Amino acid sequence: MLRSMYAGISGMKGFQTKLDVIGNNIANVNTSGFKKGRVTFQDMMSQTTSGASGPTGNRGGVNPAQVGLGSQLGSIDNIHTQGFSQTTNNPLDLQLQGDGMFILETPDGQAYTRAGNFYLDADDNIVDSDGNYLVDVDGDAPITIDEGATSISVEQDGTITFVDGNNEPQEAGQIGIAIFSNPEGLEKDGGNVYTNTNNAGLVGIMEPEVDGAATIVSGALEMSNVDLAEEFTEMITAQRGFQANTRIITTSDEILQELVNLKR
């Protein structure tokens, strides 16, 4: 069988994966805190038909002759650039402006998120939409607001204040921000949360606005960083690449058909 046919198959598989990632990006174009994916490719091993040789006294050097055997998936990266901002005027909608992630206490341990849509549960604890507790700067959870409190506000440094039943201002705690040396190394776990991995490089829990940690903006949400114009352009590129690889397979099949016809 022709090597070009298998190279075309590898190209089709790669562009199918690229289309899968693009489809997921577009599906999450309005998901709070979503970070888009990006696919990169690598060439596969090449078959060497003749090796390289250096120059001699009466002859110059010769380069190697190699036939490539197709492409393979290189990586699927999560691009952690700043997402678009959406103003909501809800004091418990929190946006991170800069590096870092909110820390959540889940039944399976700590998780991390950029989605800042938080709520108060029946016990006046600050939770996310799945009931996971928001963690403070000391790594403790939950952060609790007194029953009957009014006028909840969150400062840029993560300090949460409210007015109690006696119209006295009280402090509920300070939100902690997790900093990673390689946030692309985090693993998506669904539900807008990430889990730590050995390659994420958790630096520690920081106070907002300190040591490069993000600033917290109350009354706004960080939306997806997906750019639809870019995704549609990449979709066209992937579609044309897929079509070109199918043409390689079709052409290879026609050549094989001609070889079969030689018997007639």
Image (spheres, rainbow, N blue to C red):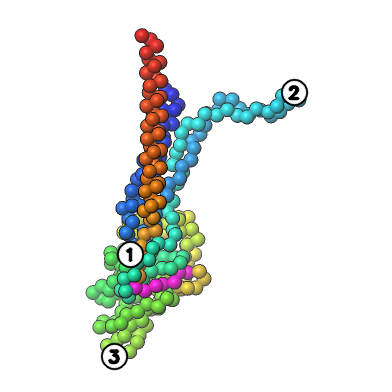
Q: Nearer the viewer, mark 2 or mark 3?
A: 2
Rendered location of residue 233, percent (x, y): 39, 47
- Packing grade of label 1 (10 A; few <14, some 14-19, many >=20) is some
- To which residue does mark 3 refer? 166
| Residue 119 appearing in the image | yes
The dot on residue 58 is: 2
Say whether residue 214 is magenta.
yes
Residue 53: image location, x then y, percent: 66, 28
**Residue to which mark 1 is pinned:** 106
Magenta extent: 213-219
Q: Which amino acid type is marked by label 2?
A: Asn
Contact, CB < 8 Å: mark 2 with mark 3?
A: no
Q: As shown in the figure, which amino acid type bears the numbered disc 3? A: Asn
Who is closer to the viewer here, 97 or 231? 231
Tell me how far mark 1 sits from mark 2, CA to CA: 73 Å
Q: Is residue 121 above or below residue 264?
A: below
Q: Secondary structure at mark 1?
A: strand
State left or right for residue 92 relative to residue 248: left
